[in-house]
């Protein structure tokens, strides 16, 4: 699931875990809704000490009715620089 910029009714979404796919790609796992109804937006802030990855989920354009279901999802985040020994974190309000 890739980051989208066309979602409505965005809400902060905490992620459950992460893993390093390659030196510049982090996979973030989270619990979200059906991919037929909802999408994810990713915000990334990189410093020398850490990488902050915040997720928001929202409704896809043109979708009216959705069922409530929890689905384990993942998104890949491409970093500007190799992760190295930097900490991966999310903001507390996510």
Image (cartoon, grey):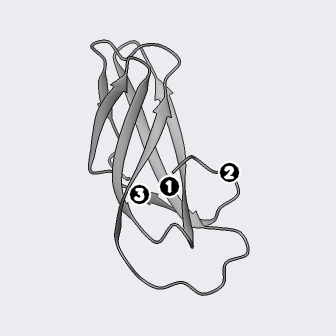
Q: Position of residue 89 (x, y in %)?
A: 32, 35
Mark 2 lies on a secondary structure that is loop
Residue 33 in view of the camera: yes
- From the viewer's side, name the closer residue of 57 and 68: 68
Q: Residue at x 54, y 84 (%)?
A: 66
* Label 1: how many Cα within 10 Å (few below 14, some 14–19, many 20+): many
The answer to whether the residues at label 3 and label 1 have Cβ atoms under 8 Å apart is yes
Q: Residue at x 34, y 16 (%)?
A: 49
Q: Residue at x 57, y 47 (%)?
A: 3
Residue 21: image quadrant is: top left
Q: Position of residue 77 (x, y in %)?
A: 48, 34
Q: Is residue 69 above or below residue 4?
A: below
* Label 2: how many Cα within 10 Å (few below 14, some 14–19, many 20+): few
Tell me if 22 is positioned left or right of 67 in this view: left
- From the viewer's side, name the closer residue of 89 and 64: 64
Q: Is residue 45 above or below residue 47?
A: below
Q: CA distance from mark 3 to mark 2?
A: 15 Å
Mark 1 lies on a secondary structure that is strand
Q: Which residue is mark 1?
A: 56
Q: CA distance from mark 1 to mark 2?
A: 10 Å
Dot 3 or dot 1: first in sequence order is 3
Q: Is residue 68 above or below residue 37?
A: below
Residue 10 in view of the camera: no
**Residue 13: numbered disc:** 3
Q: Position of residue 38 (x, y in %)?
A: 54, 67
Q: Which residue is mark 2?
A: 5
Q: Position of residue 35 (x, y in %)?
A: 51, 66
Q: Residue at x 44, y 20 (%)?
A: 24
Q: Is residue 43 above or below residue 93?
A: above
Dot 3 or dot 2: first in sequence order is 2
């Amino acid at each position: 699931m890739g980051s989208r910029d066309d979602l409505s009714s965005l809400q902060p979404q905490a992620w459950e875990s992460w893993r390093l796919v390659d030196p510049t790609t982090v996979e973030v796992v989270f619990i979200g809704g059906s991919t037929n109804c909802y999408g994810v937006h990713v915000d990334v802030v990189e410093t020398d000490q850490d990488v902050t990855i915040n997720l928001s989920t929202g409704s896809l354009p043109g979708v009216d009715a959705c069922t409530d279901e929890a689905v384990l999802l993942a998104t890949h985040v491409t970093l500007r620089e190799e992760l190295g020994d930097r900490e991966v974190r999310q903001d507390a309000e996510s």
